[in-house]
Amino acid sequence: MTVNTENYARELLFGRWYREDTDVKGNKVVEYAIMSNDGSFEFTFISYDKKGSVIEQVTEYGDWGLVADIHFTFTKSECIEEAHYIADLNDPENYHAYRVLTLDHQIFQYQHILTEETYAMHRIVDTVGHC
């Protein structure tokens, strides 16, 4: 069996990313991601109710990588409502792998290997007029 894999440049993921979605209850979920060149990440998930009030805010810290078209993460700790917790590294829920569908300077689209859920993140650019 031949598998078609792209070889994406790891450097394209360095920086800050953003995505917005709706959960199964109809609440808005926003994710802010920072992926550093040393392989560490910070992912912040904020859930809002229909009135725009924050329901929950969780920040995960861990490591990430990219090999060919496979992006993977593993969470080492998290902050929930300002309380810091060390992640259970025996818990398989702290490990994820994704197939990269699109990756360039502006968009990162990927699909979870197990659940087949698809996500699209957009680069956050701090400098006006810079792409």
Image (cartoon, helix red, strand yellow):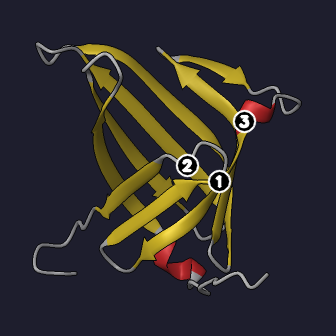
Which quadrant does the N terminus fall into?
bottom right
| Residue 51 located left or right of residue 82 | left
Q: How far apart in space, not on screen, are marks 2 and 1 (Cα)?
A: 6 Å
Do the residues under discs 2 and 1 have CB atoms within 8 angstroms? yes
Residue type marked 1: Ile
User: Spatial distance from mark 1 to mark 3, Cα to Cα?
Assistant: 14 Å
41 to the left or right of 122? right
Of 109 and 34, nearer the camera is 109
Q: Counting residues from the N terminus, which is met first, the one under dot 2 or under dot 3?
A: 3
The amino acid type of the residue labelled 3 equals: Asn
Q: Of residues 4 and 108, which is closer to you in this image? A: 4
- Residue located beneath label 1 in the image: 113
Q: Position of residue 114 (x, y in %)?
A: 67, 46
Q: x%, y% of residue 9?
A: 56, 85
Q: Earlier in the sequence, mark 1 or mark 3?
A: 3
What residue is pinned by disc 3? 94
Q: Residues within 10 Å of mark 2 (few under 14, many from 20)?
A: few
- Give the image location of residue 28, x and y in percent: 25, 27
Residue sticking out furthest to the right:
90
Q: Residue at x 19, y 72 (%)?
A: 127
Q: Which of the two marks, 1 or 3, is nearer to us in this view?
A: 1
The residue under label 2 is 116
